[in-house]
Each structure stands twice: as structure tokens, then as C-alpha cells.
Amino acid sequence: NTTELFNDGWEFAKSSLDQQDWRGLGFAPVDLPHDWLIYNTLDLYENSIGWYRRIYDHQEQDQQVLLSFDGVYMDSSLYVNGCFVGEWKYGYSSFEHDISTFLKAGQNEIILKVVYQSPNSRWYSGAGIYRNVWLKKRGPSFIETDGTYVAARETGKGWAVEVETEIVCQAPLRVRHAIADSNGDVVAES
């Protein structure tokens, strides 16, 4: 299982709200994180669509591939090779999409459509991919994203720690949880 920063190589184009397709738009290179509204300080609440495009060279067919977005404001839809993958409407939380079934060997076009319509917030929110993007690859057995929950409570004799882990596995495996102190020494395990 690997996770790599996926911020490089993106291009951007902006359109009006009635533009429903990215084909024919003039894309230009862009650095992520990115906010397209900040470039026009005279209209910080311009209703518009931001289109992000990236070409991804995919070779490994036996892994699940996910795109993970730490933050996109606001209403986003993801397309891979022209096919709709999924959407995320909320602009203040991270999300991910499994793109495995949409990929082919070689060059793949990834499009993220981001719709910004005002009013939508009490303060300036910006618009676009405003946090990092990650490419995750994982095999047939893995820990679900955000699949580990840890709760600790003080008891009269010390601390009780409860750990739950959500795992997808295709073969028998053993899970080991360990708690280490600041020196890296394991102080408890199960």
C-alpha cells in the first residue's frame, strides 16, 4: 500500500455556470493548492466553474487506486477518461474516490469539476482545490481509510485504551496494535 502526493501536473480552466463540458476549454498549468477567486479581487464571489485536469500514466493493473482530496471548495464532480466517478458537495471536509475501474493501461485523463455559487458562506471561502491531493494504491488486503479508532480513558490503575480497526482482507492475516512511548519503546500491545 502506498500514498503519494499528487499535486504536480494539474492544469486549470474557468468557465461560466452554463458550461457543462471541459472539452474545448483553454487549460493552463496551475500549482496546487489553488484558489481561482483570489485572482480577481474586484469579484471575490464570482459564480463560475473551475475545471482541473491531470494526465495520469497508469501501469499497475492489480491494485486498487484512489484519489484523495484534502479539501475542495465546493461542489465537485470527478471524471476519469470521460466517465463520471462520483461527487462531493461539502467544501470543508476531505474525501476520496476509487478510480480503479475507470483506469486503463497508459495515459488517463482525470477531470475535477468544481462549481462555485455565491452566497454559500458567511466569510470568504475561496474556490478550487485548496488542499493537497493524494494518489493511494492498495492491494487486496488493507486498512480502510480512517478505519482505525482509538479511545483512551483513565482508570484508577492507569489508562484503558480501546482500539478498533476496519480491515478488508482477501487472505488470513494477523493485526498487531502497539503503543510506543516517546523513546519508541513498546509499552503495550495486543
Image: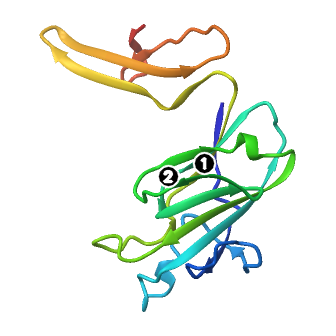
Residue 125 falls left or right of residue 16 = left
Amino acid, disc 2: Asp
The single residue placed furthest to the left in the displayed view is 156
Amino acid, disc 1: Trp
**In the figure, residue 114 lies in which quadrant?**
bottom right
Q: Which mark is residue 134?
A: 1
- Residue 30: % across, % down: 64, 71
Q: Is residue 3 above or below residue 13?
A: above
Q: Which mark is residue 151?
A: none
In the image shown, does 184 or 97 lie closer to the viewer?
97
In the image shown, does 150 or 90 lie closer to the viewer?
90
Q: Is residue 47 above or below residue 76?
A: below
The single residue placed furthest to the right in the displayed view is 106
- Residue 145: % across, % down: 52, 34
| Residue at image mark 2 | 70
Label 1: state its secondary structure: strand
In the image shown, does 177 or 118 lie closer to the viewer?
118
- Residue 12: % across, % down: 65, 73
